[in-house]
Image: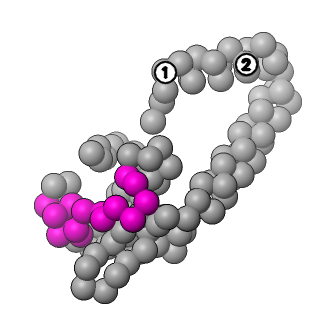
Amino acid sequence: MIVLNYQDRRPIYEQVVEKFQILIIKGVLKPDEQMPSVRKLAIELSLNPNTIQRAFSVLEAQGYIYSIKGRGNFVSPQNDFLLERKKEVYKRFEEVVVQALNIGFDKTVLVECVNNTAERGVL
């Protein structure tokens, strides 16, 4: 379900957060579906349970999941986070396009880059 990149410079918990965000946004994890337990996920990924707990805390703060004491963590049914995430990505994308145009990239090259990336379906 989740594959981590140990060569990535980002902290492991941030990678876990990102992977779960993608799974939730793409609908792989459905609204109100129970998340794997902290202990189970820590064992599967060979991580300290505190790392998983930190990732789940971030996901909860962002509105991706909610917790029920004694029962576990569940995928949030609200889609507000999806709209916010799209706005955030659009803003970052816009900034990169402006930078590329400012250093001389041609619009057709940028469009080709977007098309190639979309075809690969990069996760």
Quickly name the residue at label 2. Answer: 111
Q: How crowded is the residue under tag 2: few (<14 C-alpha within 10 Å), some, or many (20+)?
A: few
Q: Amino acid at mark 1?
A: Arg
Mostly what secondary structure, the magenta segment? Answer: loop
Q: Earlier in the sequence, mark 1 or mark 2?
A: 2
Q: Is residue 34 shown in magenta? A: yes
* Residue 60 visible in the displayed image: yes
10 left or right, relative to 78: left
- Name the spot of residue 65 as percent of width and height, x first: 44, 68
88 left or right, relative to 20: right
Q: Amino acid at mark 2?
A: Val
In which quadrant will I find the C terminus? Answer: top left
Location of residue 111 with respect to 77 vertically, above or below: above
- Name the spot of residue 115 as percent of width and height, x first: 63, 18
* Residue 59 visible in the displayed image: no
What residue lies at 71% left-to-right and 39% top-to-bottom? 93
Instruction: Label 2, secondary structure: give it.
Output: helix
Instruction: Label 1, secondary structure: give it.
Output: helix
What residue lies at 58% left-to-right and 59% top-to-bottom? 79
Location of residue 38 with respect to 111 vertically, above or below: below
Q: How crowded is the residue under tag 1: few (<14 C-alpha within 10 Å), some, or many (20+)?
A: few
Coloured how?
one colour
Quickly name the residue at label 1. Answer: 120
Mark identifier at residue 32? none
What residue lies at 58% left-to-right and 17% top-to-bottom? 116
- Name the spot of residue 2 as percent of width and height, x first: 29, 47
Location of residue 73 with respect to 89 vertically, above or below: below
* Mark 1 and mark 2: Cα distance apart in space: 14 Å
Q: Is residue 77 shown in magenta? A: no
* Magenta extent: 29-43
46 left or right, relative to 101: left
